[in-house]
Amino acid sequence: MAVPALHLCAATLLLLAGCASLTPPPEPPPPTAQRIQLLLPTDFLLIGEQHDAPDHQRIEREVVEALAAKGQLAALALEMAEQGQDTRQLPVSASDAQVRTALRWNEAGWPWQAYGPVVMAAVRAGAPVLGANLPRERMKDAMADVSLDAQLSPQALKAQQDAVRTGHCNMLPESQIGPMTRIQIARDRAMAQTLIQARTTGKTVVLVSGSGHSPKVLGVPQHLPTDMVASAVRLLAGDVPREGGPAVYDAVWLTPALPPRDYCADFKAKSR
């Protein structure tokens, strides 16, 4: 007896559903300490985060703890604090308040609840925590410093300008793209200078920054000497990026996606 086509379709769907239910879930990523091993030895480990992703700050703390456990942590450098601020004079028993004071921590921009654990992990390990960002009072001069345009190749400079344009939701006047790009370049160069000064043979300096500072093709690595080794990791909440191959990052570590958010709507609201 022939089986009606409708019944065949239903049976096929049930079979497919059954097969799908048998598909094993994706394996969890290896422990952070294990992933770091694939990037060592390196003078500098650049971790580019998404600032509103708590999993990223957790991973950064794990990186610091893993390197410290091996005696390989030279220092922790931060975009979140300015050059000239550091914890070198503090003991390993320093309190959170003492550390925040030493770094002149900007709570409004960088919630201590998010970044305190990674900072204190370095302090407890006896490693200095270093402000690496360009001081605010130097940004105006950077905007007018046309020599900064020559710090990148023409192709990289255009890519950086495009990143500044889209990063500001295409709301900046075109006349401001050049000056704002120079600030970005100056910030990358300041972070690179901080890393170079903290370099210690046989150990690794960790830089925690936004992902825009870590690409090898136009970020901080562009301002490091070629005889020093730098590894760049992008932390990404969500799916594998379409861009960002080996020429851009040495590794991309995925974390669960965040709830959808219209960042440009937030930016526009703040700009009013």
Image: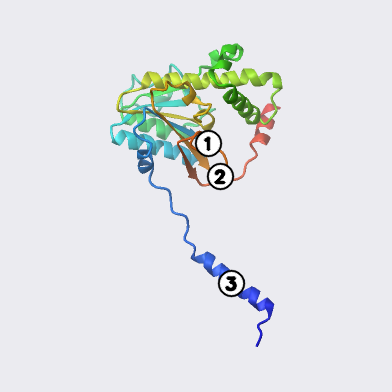
Q: Amino acid at mark 2?
A: Leu
Q: Amino acid at mark 1?
A: Gln
Give 111 or 161, whichever is nearer the viewer: 161
Contact between labelled residues 1 and 2, with CB atoms less than 8 Å apart: yes
The x and y percentages for residue 256 are 51, 47
Q: Secondary structure at mark 1?
A: loop
Q: For label 3, count other residues whose C-alpha is less than 10 Å away and answer few (under 14), some (14-19) or many (20+).
A: few
Q: Residue at x 50, y 32 (%)?
A: 111
Residue matched to label 1: 50
Contact between labelled residues 3 and 1, with CB atoms less than 8 Å apart: no
Closest to the camera, between mark 2 and mark 3, is 3
Q: Is residue 37 above or below residue 158?
A: below
Residue matched to label 2: 258
Q: Amino acid at mark 3?
A: Leu
Per the model, the C-alpha gap separating discs 2 and 3 is: 32 Å
Residue matched to label 3: 14
